[in-house]
Image (tube, grey):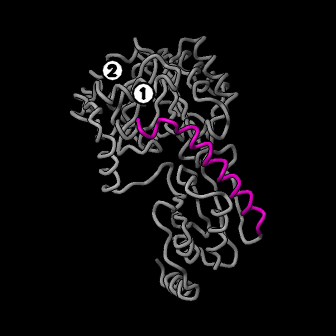
Amino acid sequence: MKRRNFVAVTAGLAAAAPPARASEDRQVIAAGDGIPHTAADYAAQLARLTAGGSLHKDSYSREGVVRELERRVAAELGKEYAVWMPTGTLANHLAVRLLAGEKRRVLMQAESHLYNDCGDCAQTLSGLAMIPLAPGKATYTLEEVEQAASRAAGSRVAVPIGALQIESPVRRRQGERFDFSEMKKITAWAREHHVGTHLDGARIFLESAYTGIPVKEYAALFDTVYVSTYKYFNAASGAVLAGPKALLENTYHIRRMFGGGLNEVWPFAAVALHHFEGFSARYRKAVETSEAVIASLAEDQNFEVARIANGANIFRMRVRGVNALVYQQRLLLAGITVRDPANEWFSLQVNETWNRAGAGEIAARFRKGLG
């Protein structure tokens, strides 16, 4: 923290003389997609989930509560089969590897997680050629797909497209969604041309709450879908990859080949399954609460609110007349946790903790932070 900011914060807090911080179970954590937990919280949750003795352990990430989670996620997505994965990186990688087969080119967003944040895993470990589309955008178009396919097929050595991936919402675009109408056109083209389709749906349950489109409707467009189990189903780690049984039922062999056949993952699967049940209804309620809060703050001249175009659970806010760092500390004491501001703007996320208080009370907490 810069010296002048430190002085501003300490002076501002001293002048405000705030009350004691709100209790943890009442705190709205407007940062992250899920409910944060300490090691002690997680251990206590596992103790509760195992107390009845009915939870069955897995063996090398198979059977027991892991299989329960796989079946439950597959059913919710409308898919035939699902397999647990230790990371979303591996889930996405294995999906495009299996779908592409001997046709080595894979299309995806230039802003996607698999293209940017996985150390070129698919290129290095599976020999795939990753073709990035639409740099700086969340959505690539059918026209771009057709152009890429034409270039590949028309090369001196034909290299047909084997698979394409769509990520939605896009983390690198602050949760901007892939245009749904374009998604339908692209996946229809892919089926017609025998190109495999994969949805990086790490946050697709969040997107569904904002669009009203059921997750099954998204998933039906794709051969395979990956869903994160730690981002908002609150497991310590993990992912689930769902799709056709014929494609995925022996994936545990490849998972082990890549070092992902962990001996016991029941502590991840049990927590994810617990939070998965009833999530959509709980999250819709959190979204409704947050929308009422956003509307209230947008009408208040002390606040400026900016929405992400075609976005999901991320919005931006700044306050007028108060140092942002001072406001952040006052807000914490009022019962709302936010990340550090950037150029006076706060980036806020909606998660299940927005169910811890009513919209009126949360809006009042934001105003209380003004001092």
Quarter of the image containing the C terminus? bottom right
User: Tag 1, which secondary structure?
Assistant: strand
- Residue 275 within the segment the image draws in magenta: yes
Q: SS at mark 2? A: helix
* Number of numbered discs on residues: 2
Residue drawn 54% across and 15% down?
153
Could you tell me the amino acid type at mark 1? Leu
User: Left or right: where does residue 168 sit relative to residue 97?
Assistant: right
Q: According to the image, label 2 marks what residue?
A: 251
- What is the C-alpha distance between the residues marked 2 and 1? 10 Å
Q: Residue at x 50, y 85 (%)?
A: 10
Q: Which mark is residue 309?
A: none
Of 137 and 238, nearer the camera is 238
Q: Is residue 129 left or right of residue 208?
A: left
Left or right: residue 139 compared with residue 64:
right
- Classify 11 as above or below 281: below
Q: Residue furthest front?
A: 52
Nearest the viewer among 227 and 127 is 227
Residue 302: give x, y in percent of width and height: 73, 72
Which portion, as a residue range, is magenta? 273-300
Question: Are circles 2 and 1 on residues that touch, CB within 8 Å?
Answer: yes
Residue 306 in percent (x, y) is at: 70, 57
- In which image quadrant can residue 183 be found? top right
Dominant secondary structure (helix, strand or loop) of the stretch shown in magenta: helix
- Name the residue rendered at 56%, 43% in the picture: 282
Q: Nearer the viewer, residue 31 or 75?
A: 75
Number of the label disc, if any, that sits on residue 241: 1
Say what amino acid the circle numbered 2 marks: Thr
In primary-sequence order, the first of circles 2 and 1 is 1
**Image position, residue 346 (x, y; %):** 59, 63
